[in-house]
Image (cartoon, grey):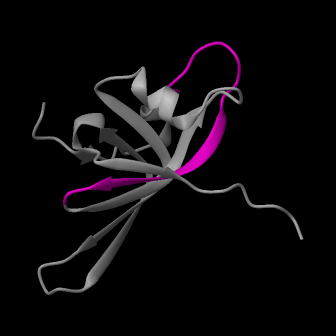
Amino acid sequence: RTAVRLFAPETEEDVGSSTSGPTPTPRKVWCMMTDGAVRGALDVLDHVRVSDFLAHHSGFVGLRGAELHRIGLDGREERLTFESAIVSLEAILGVSEEAPTTAA
């Protein structure tokens, strides 16, 4: 289990919701890992900070609309996209939340 950092299920429905009860809001986050970074939408309740959400969870979290950014064997940046990804919290070194986009 500790060797798995990220896996991508075949469909988004396989990820499920990270919370129960009220409808969560997707928050765009970057998860930094030793061998790259994953960007995606993490479902979190409106009144909960992303850092608090992650501090109270263990194991894995689901990201929707995920992108994996890493350096390939040839030294070039690779970007792989997935409908969804499940990321190990043990593999995450840091998390950054993107500022919400506002309409101009």
Q: Does the magenta stretch include residue 10?
A: no
Seen in the image, is 6 located left or right of residue 48?
A: left
- What quarter of the picture does the N terminus occupy? top left
> Where is 22 relative to 14, above or below?
above
- What quarter of the picture does the C terminus occupy? bottom right
> Where is 85 relative to 17, above or below?
below
Residue 54 on image: x %, y %? 43, 30
Q: Residue at (38%, 57%) from the top-left corner?
A: 38
Q: Residue at (65%, 27%) from the top-left corner?
A: 45
Seen in the image, is 27 located left or right of residue 74?
A: right
> Where is 24 relative to 27, above or below?
above
Residue 79 on image: x %, y %? 36, 73
Magenta segment: 17-34
> Where is 104 relative to 31, above or below?
below
Q: Residue at (39%, 22%) from the top-left corner?
A: 57
Residue 90 on image: x %, y %? 23, 36
Seen in the image, is 68 located left or right of residue 28?
A: left
